[in-house]
Image (cartoon, grey):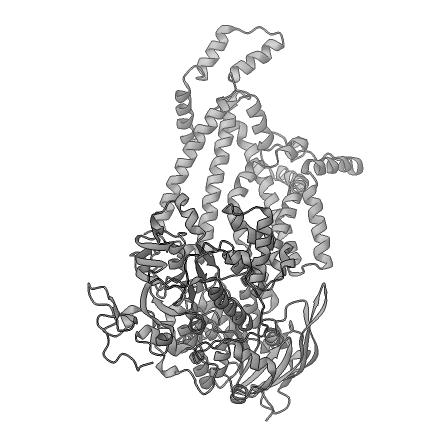
Amino acid sequence: MLEYLIRRIFSMILTLAAISVLVFIIIQLPPGDYLSTYIAELQSQGEMVDEEKIEFLRHQYGLDRSMPEQYLTWVWGLLQGDLGYSFEYNLPVNEVVGDRLFLSMVLNFATIIFIYLMSFPIGVYSATHQYSWGDHGLTLIGFLGLATPNFLLALVLLYFANVWFGTSIGGLMDPQYLDQPWSMDKAMSVAAHLWVPVVVIGTSGTAGMIRRLRANLLDELHKQYVVTGRAKGLSPGKLLIKYPLRMALNPFIADIGNLLPQVVSGSVIVSSVMSLPTTGPMLLSALQSQDMYLAGSFLIFLALLTVVGMFVSDVLLTVLDPRIRLSGRTRA
Amino acid sequence: MSPLLDVSNLGVTFDTPSGIVRAVRDVSFQISAGSTVAVVGESGSGKSVTAQAIMGLLPRPASINSGKILFRDSSVDSADSGVVDIAKLDPRSEAFRTIRGNRISMIFQEPMTSLSPLHTIGDQISEALLLHREATPEEAKALSVDMLAKVGFPDPARAYDTYPFELSGGLRQRAMISMALVCRPSLLIADEPSTALDVTIQAQILKLIKDLQQELGMAVLMITHDLGVVANMADEVVVAYHGQVMERGSARDIFAKPEHPYLKALLKAVPHFDMKDGERLVPLREIKHEAGNLLREREMTPTDHKDDHPILSVRNVSKSYLTRSHKGLFVSASSIRPLLAVNDVSFDIKRGECLGLVGESGCGKTTLSKIIMRSVDPDCGEVVFTNDGKETDLLHLNDHQLVPTRRKIQYIFQDPFSSLNPRMTVHDLLSEPLVIHGIGDVTYRREFVQELMNLVGLDPRWLNRYPHSFSGGQRQRVGIARSLALKPELVLCDEPVSALDVSVQAQILNLLKDLQSDLGLTYLFISHNLAVVDYIADRIAVMCAGQIVEVAAREDLFRNPMHPYTQALVSAVPYPDPDHPLNFDALVEGQASAPARWPQPFGPRQDVPTPLLDSGGGHLIRAHEVPVNSGGAS
């Protein structure tokens, strides 16, 4: 087991290194750099560009050095926790991202919890009452949720909240708390605003999860070992939880690897529509303006979360499923 | 005294989209305490549904629509109040749950799937105790370990913490039995408890059920299609057909003078060792088939005059797999060294004969057939195929050179359900080999395919149907027709009848026999069913642990088995005759298939591989010297 863990961690590091190279190259691929974009913008507005100042900036940011050099500087900084400097915001990346990262995590964790809380009872009910009226009704609602684009739902909610309640539900807090230090009131305001994006983002996830859970559970419910459990005299509820539900969970644990990066980067469009102060829109604009350290930091962070997520789900599966744990002891 | 279980006029219906199906009609029988009743029938006879009704395990669309199931609960003392009508109870009710798993319990056919893979054996066994006995976890564990010891686990305390997938099939079924019996039920329902097991393991499990039945004083309701098992286990027999009881009575009467034509026919359809030479099985529904002209016009090598040159000659073939090293106690391959699936196997198949290959699951017989088909590459050895006087070593052909030989060797698979592509019509399935090898044009193929259908007794009008609209036996015939499409010389049949009902099995066996003589085919017939091999084969090779341990002519082998493994196999086959019971006492405990347990001169000796010796008359036997008292012990 220990050997397996070490091997896994080692391969994770290799993967991350490879990703960092790719990320760096891809960001640099479009012709020019942040400064040339910046100059073009200034010139289009008819402003004079001081060649010397440009040269100074280029040297300042290290843009005049070779790609490998730039890469190594960047990676060396990353390892020390220095994410670099955002050209667009004129601030260190750490400071630009700070609050946004936290808020995105709050939002997306809330969404995931919402999805689980909603979809598990409904999925289990749907599977155990297959083809009943309840199942059909919930399935219909689920399909509606799947089929409605999130941003559309967001727009509809924004509109009606304004028309009916006269309130703006955009953002994650009342405007007065923006850029204020954290306080009890600010937290309450966030909580009050949070539910709308959570519902908007969570609907399709919930619908998808219900369908998958229902399908998984239906497969398991017809297995022979369930009959064995019934033959033993177990009550239906106990039986369901101990055997088929436990078996049906495996795909969800395996899914954690995909969930983690979503927590940070998911819901870009909805965030834009609802002007949520999350990381999604920021990543988008950083990529557009070739703000390379900001974009690079985001992408590396996402890669890290993906790799760690995969690792966590693999280890959890090994712990929870004896078939993987015991028959995996191979090639000694 | 009233019987333990009294089923009277039971009717079960299935509410299906295509209407109401009466799966069980007017079924009545009694089980008295401590006795064994067997319900026999083919698939679809309603025998399993009856068992499910008694257990309250009917699937959702099914319901009991008439009759009573009176169960006298022996745990209640008073003579009358202990009787419950199970048919009236709601299967989900508390009252039913206290009976299920407690007073009546059940074991199932598939020991592989009947246990949850995520929970330890001990967890699943003690669960029943915690439910019904209000035992503390410690007591439950103690009782469970006790039970595991009773069913013959070598190290019960350790077995308690193992997971089902760490155990062999036989041990899993033992675990299943201990789970069913841990609450000491007064009735055990066994639904095909030994069907999925090898013959020696089957005998052990049957013995175990019998022993425990005596020890615990319980009654057993045995659901099976195997008349041999019935004859050995049952006091009374109920014969079911299409949901109705055809005949019932004591086992002795039933076998001695079967009354109902169905039962008589069933008995005639089962191959057994006492058949006379040339005696044919009589299937319940005979199929008519004819070989047409196109099939007969083959490049006629004179198959009639039997040249002595074998059509296939397998020489010193070995194949090893790297096994995973387990630290678990019960996994058979506990070694880290490579497992020899096929170990230095040599044999010949003469032109026009049927060579039977017998062995238990995991003995390497299927690997061997795959090596001959070149779908598995062996580590060493050669396989020489002789056709038109030309010898070719199959193992040294490359993919391109192999193509012409493929036409000469074809394969019939075990599972008629998964071996036919469900998205192809029968016409496409049968003409595909012709298309692949570019034989004939469209009109020729159409005519030929129709002829193939006639050959296996299927209506050519069904050519546009898809496999799912055929029964298992019909599908297997499609598979046979497909394998004959290229007019092969040699056909490898890998367990072609083991997935079929006995009556259908007789059909297919007769068909294969007829085709062999009509078309001059040569068969390698692989099976674990000794009686089937005995019926169809001319010579039989017995395989064990990757080696061939005995080869002899059909008449000789099972009448006069010399090798201890063959003897164990033969003695474990249940006869459909109550006067010929299994000798449970002589059963080899543990594994008869472990070479280390064979007595000398059969067992392995240090550094010397055991040779295959000729004891005379072509009766080959793997031993260090030919045993003196050859002939006798059986």
Query: In the rendering, at what x and y percent does residue A101 appear?
Result: 55, 34
What is the quadrant of residue B205 in the picture? bottom left
Give whichever of A126, B372 is nearer the camera. Answer: B372
As drawn, which residue projects farthest toward the left? Answer: B607
Q: Could you say where residue B191 lies in the image, as x and y percent from the top left? A: 53, 74
Q: Quadrant of the N terminus of chain B?
A: bottom right
Q: Is residue B447 above or below residue B545?
A: above
Most foreground residue, B91 or A256: B91
| Coordinates of residue A240 in the picture (x, y in percent) | 58, 63
| Residue B354 horizontal side relative to residue B334, left or right | right
Q: Which residue is drawn at the image coordinates 63% and 62% (left, top)?
A: B459
Where is residue B249 drawn, in percent x and y?
57, 88
Which residue is farthest right? A164
Q: Is residue B164 above or below residue B422?
A: below
Question: Looking at the rendering, in which quadrant would you find the C terminus of chain B?
Answer: bottom left
Q: Nearer the viewer, residue A294 or A40?
A: A40
- In depth, the one of B604 and A229 nearer the eye is B604
Work out whether residue B222 can be spotted.
no
Identify the residue at image location x=51%, y=45%: B438
In the image, residue B95 sits, relative to residue B326, either above or below, namely: below
Seen from this angle, which residue lies furthest bottom?
B1
Residue B346 seen by the camera: yes
Give left or right: position of B111 versus A176: left
Q: Count the marks: how many? A: 0
